Structure formats: structure tokens, C-alpha cells
């Protein structure tokens, strides 16, 4: 178990002084799926632009326990993560590791379609709601698998027939469900049609790569995806997977820059993957410039204010739930009243208690709706009443709040932030922030 660590952050007390360049990493929520897809291949795959975050390390550990050989390789110009899952020695996913990361459930698709069975615990990950996997189980059973429920685990069996292609309509647009069943269908017998699919860019990115290696996936990025299965024939690695830039990491830095930045240049990102955020911020008066692969946020030191606005989280291309905590924190600095409606998860407002202790005027109307009245100065919480990272994204939001505030803040539980943001303190320091990591 890693030692418990905390951030100590010196607040900017409302000054917008961060300036410099931030380079965006490959998307956590794309690379974890591409790593899972290694099970679909008859040889080693290469992954590029892989963020060296805790979740990547966890997925590596899960795959190694299944029998995969994984290592980093470097050439003069590139660094690759190499995964050879051609020898699978078990289809039992490690309980402890799976319970620390929701993305582990994505592995069940490739394992079930390749090996005919899989067993795993109820997946863990960010505590942001119940996050069931009923849609996965229902879909597997439609493809001919049988589920045997253990005490805290699922055993899914498709040995006799393997998975058969069929039509599946997802009751909810599920990102993980879409990716997992898309990958399961790659090795299934016949055609699978997935309907009411999620349309996130990470799904498109993985689908395009699988197709470059011989899969036959049509429609990724739309609500209907058709997959012609190979009837068990494994894919042959042809092209490396180049991880798509992380739109949630980039969006997190854009929001931070909007309230704490003088002039911040965010490079190696894809502005068109962040249209919902960028258009909201531009409409509220934030000075944002976008190019092909960068976003630049500038503030003049004088005008401290921007208009309040309402937000409704929504499946892509709507406003991402993974930027909800960050935008709520930003709205504590807006002039006026804002309402944020969280349509995806029913338990994603825990961090507002920390903001309230810092003086924010936030009312949780119900498990899916908060009202924010701005503008308020955020202040240092009393000694001993540390701030806390409640999940990956709320952790970044509390970092924004600490940088906005007067005085010094301590944020505990930051291993959650490390799950999704590589070397955050190093990158914030390069923008001029006073932040350090301590063992706590
Ligand atoms: C992915 O989670 C992301 N995680 C989440 O990011 C993100 O918040 C979420 O998509 C929504 O965009 C990864 O990609 C690893 P869903 P996922 O299935 O796939 C319900 C982060 O911080 N549902 O799209 O688990 C579910 O409870 C993380 O990077 C069912 O009811 O999300 C939720 O209400 C946090 N039954 C809704 O669907 C199911 O079988 C959307 O969840 C599956 C999902």
C-alpha cells in the first residue's frame, strides 16, 4: 500500500498569476481500454502517448496477473508500453486490484470472448454513485453467456457456444458498456449491433485502432455500432495505439486557468473534444483562444469577474460529468447565481462540503442539483480540518479551490488525484503555483 500523501498549497488569494505552458497527456479513459484490448491479439501490441498514472499501473498489474508480459520500450524519439497478452493463464481478475478501479470491468469483454469465461468482483473505482454493471451482464447473456453470481463476484460462462453476435440496445448510454461490448463482439461469431451507444472520442480512438489491426467496427462515435466478429480468430498487431489526448485533463487545466491564470498555454490537446466547456466559458466572458492542438487562456489582471451560468452534465458531446466538480468550483467566483445539474451520477457532490467549509455559498438542492451563489472569497480552513480528494476529478477541483483561496491548504487522499493526473504538482509549479507533496 502506498504511503498516504497530501498536497500543501499556498493560495493565490484571488490573484490570476499562473502563467506558462502545460502539455496534455494521453487520455486515461482511452488507454485503459486499449490496454484491455491487448487480450484480443495473438501477439504484443505497442501503445504510445501513455500517461504514467496510477490507473495505468493498476491495469498493468491486473493484466500481468492474467499472464500478460508488459514493459516500457524506448526508441530515440518515442516511448512505448508493450503488452503481450497472447498467453492468458487465468480468466479470474484479481479482486483487490479490480476493486480499486472501475475500468477493470472493461477487461471482461475481451476475456469472455477470447477464453469463453471470466470471473471478477463488483468493480470499484471512484465513489460517485452506485455504478452497477447490470447493462454488461444483460448484454453478455443476450450474446449467449450464462452468469453465476458469487457472494461478491460474477462468474460468466460462454464456453460451449462462445459469444454469438446479436442486437443489443443499451438502456443507458454507458461509456464502459459500449467499449466492453464492442471489444467482446470483435471475436464473437457473426454480427453484433450495439444501439444507444456512448459517443465519447476515446471510444472512436480505440475502434479506429482495432480496425487498423483487422477488426471490422463501423459507427463508433455514433449511437449505433456494428461489429462483424472474427469467430474467435485473434487480431494481429499491425499499428501501435496512439493514445488520444486527455480532454478531461485539458478541460481541468482550462478551468483552473480561467480563475487562476494570467496567460496559460495548454498544448497537445484537441479543442474540438471540449466544445461544450469552451463555448460555455467563452459565453461567460473568459478570454479563450483555440488552435488545432492548443488552448490559450488569458485574463487581464483588472476585471476579476465573469457572468454566472448554468451547467447540465450530459453524455458526449454534452458537458462532461468529469468536469462537473471543477466547473462548480469555478462558479463560486462568478457574479450571480448558477445551477449545476448532474444527469449521469447520483453521488458526485461530496466535494461541495469542502468548498462550503472554505466559505463557498453552495446549496445541494438534491443528489443531482447544486446552486452556487458568487462571487465569494474562498478562505483557509481551520488547522486540522484538512481538505480531501473525494475522487479523481473532485481532487483536481479542490486543488483549484486551494489555489483560489487565501492562506495555505492541506489536501489529503491525493493518491486519488495521482490515478488520473500525472505529476500534477510538478506541472502546477511550472505555472508558478506554490505546491508540495508531503507524506501525511
Ligand atoms: C466512464 O465511466 C469513465 N471512466 C468515467 O470517468 C466517466 O465519468 C463516465 O464514463 C461517464 O462519462 C472510465 O472510462 C474508466 P458509464 P463508466 O457506464 O463507463 C450507469 C474519471 O474520473 N450504468 O458511462 O463507468 C452508471 O451508474 C471517471 O475518469 C448502469 O446503470 O460510466 C452511470 O450512472 C469517473 N449500469 C451511467 O450509467 C451499467 O451497467 C453512465 O455510466 C453501466 C452504467
Image (spheres, rainbow, N blue to C red):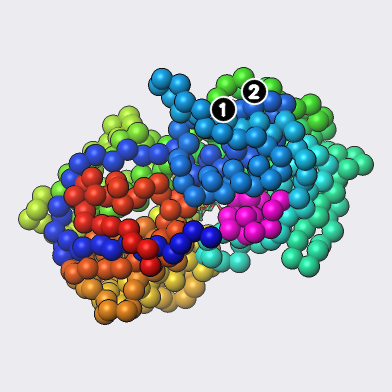
Local SS, label 1: strand
According to the picture, the residue beneath numbered tag 1 turns out to be 46
Q: Residues within 10 Å of mark 1 (few under 14, many from 20)?
A: many
Q: How many marks?
A: 2
The picture places residue 423, in percent across and down from the top left corner, at 36, 47
The picture places residue 110, in percent across and down from the top left corner, at 72, 40
Q: CA–CA distance between discs 1 and 2? A: 8 Å
Q: Quadrant of residue 37?
A: top right
Q: Quadrant of the C terminus?
A: bottom left
Quarter of image, ligand 1: bottom right
Pick whichever of labels 1 and 2 is earlier in the sequence.
1
Image height of 185 relative to 327, above or below? above
Judged by its main secondary structure, the magenta piece is helix
**Residue in view at x 52 percent, y 49 percent:** 55
Q: Residues within 10 Å of mark 2 (few under 14, many from 20)?
A: many
Residue 323 in sight in this render: yes
According to the picture, the residue beneath numbered tag 2 turns out to be 237
Local SS, label 2: loop
- Bounds of the magenta span? 93-106
Residue 100 part of the magenta segment: yes
- Which of these two is toward me, 199 or 255? 255
Image height of 351 relative to 77, above or below? below
Disc 1, disc 2: CB below 8 Å?
Answer: yes
Amino acid at each position: 500500500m502506498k504511503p498516504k500523501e497530501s498536497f500543501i498549497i499556498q493560495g493565490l488569494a484571488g490573484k490570476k498569476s499562473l502563467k506558462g505552458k502545460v502539455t496534455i497527456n494521453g487520455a486515461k479513459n482511452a488507454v485503459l481500454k486499449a490496454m484491455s484490448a491487448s487480450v484480443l491479439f495473438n501477439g504484443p501490441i505497442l501503445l504510445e502517448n501513455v500517461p504514467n498514472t496510477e490507473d495505468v499501473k493498476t491495469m498493468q498489474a491486473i493484466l500481468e496477473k492474467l499472464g500478460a508480459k508488459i514493459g516500457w520500450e524506448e526508441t530515440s524519439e518515442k516511448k512505448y508500453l508493450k503488452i503481450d497478452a497472447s498467453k492468458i493463464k487465468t480468466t479470474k481478475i484479481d479482486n483487490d486490484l479490480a476493486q480499486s478501479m472501475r475500468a477493470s470491468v472493461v477487461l471482461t469483454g475481451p476475456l469472455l470472448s477470447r477464453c469463453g469465461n471470466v470471473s471478477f468482483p463488483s468493480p470499484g473505482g471512484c465513489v460517485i454513485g452506485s455504478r452497477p454493471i447490470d447493462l454488461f451482464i444483460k448484454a453478455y447473456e443476450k450474446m449467449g453467456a450464462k452468469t453465476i453470481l458469487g457472494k461478491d463476484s460474477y462468474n460468466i460462462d460462454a464456453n460451449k457456444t462462445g459469444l454469438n453476435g446479436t442486437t443489443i440496445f443499451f438502456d443507458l448510454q454507458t461509456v464502459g458498456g459500449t467499449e466492453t461490448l464492442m471489444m467482446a463482439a470483435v471475436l464473437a461469431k457473426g454480427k453484433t449491433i450495439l444501439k444507444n451507444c456512448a459517443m465519447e472520442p476515446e471510444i472512436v480512438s480505440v475502434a479506429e485502432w482495432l480496425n487498423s489491426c483487422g477488426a471490422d467496427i463501423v459507427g463508433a462515435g455514433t449511437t449505433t455500432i456494428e461489429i462483424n466478429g472474427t469467430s474467435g480468430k485473434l487480431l494481429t498487431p499491425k499499428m501501435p495505439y496512439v493514445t488520444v489526448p486527455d480532454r478531461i485533463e485539458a478541460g481541468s487545466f482550462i478551468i483552473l486557468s480561467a480563475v487562476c491564470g494570467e496567460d496559460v498555454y495548454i498544448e497537445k490537446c484537441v479543442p474540438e473534444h471540449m466544445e461544450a466547456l469552451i463555448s460555455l466559458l467563452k459565453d461567460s466572458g473568459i478570454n479563450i483562444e483555440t488552435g488545432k492542438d492548443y488552448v490559450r487562456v488569458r485574463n487581464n489582471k483588472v476585471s476579476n469577474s465573469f457572468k454566472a451560468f448554468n451547467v447540465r452534465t450530459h453524455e458526449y458531446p454534452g458537458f462532461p460529468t468529469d468536469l462537473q466538480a471543477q466547473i462548480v468550483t469555478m462558479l463560486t467566483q462568478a457574479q450571480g447565481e448558477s445551477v449545476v445539474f448532474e444527469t449521469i451520477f447520483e453521488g458526485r457532490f461530496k466535494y461541495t462540503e469542502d468548498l462550503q467549509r472554505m466559505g463557498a455559498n453552495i446549496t445541494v438542492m438534491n443528489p443531482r442539483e447544486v446552486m452556487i451563489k458568487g462571487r465569494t472569497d474562498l478562505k483557509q480552513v481551520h488547522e486540522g480540518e484538512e481538505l480531501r480528494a473525494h475522487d479523481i476529478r473532485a481532487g483536481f477541483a479542490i486543488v483549484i479551490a486551494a489555489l483560489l483561496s487565501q492562506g495555505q491548504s492541506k489536501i489529503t487522499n491525493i493518491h486519488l488525484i495521482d490515478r488520473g493526473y500525472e505529476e500534477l504538482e510538478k506541472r502546477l509549479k511550472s505555472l508558478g503555483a506554490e505546491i508540495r507533496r508531503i507524506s501525511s
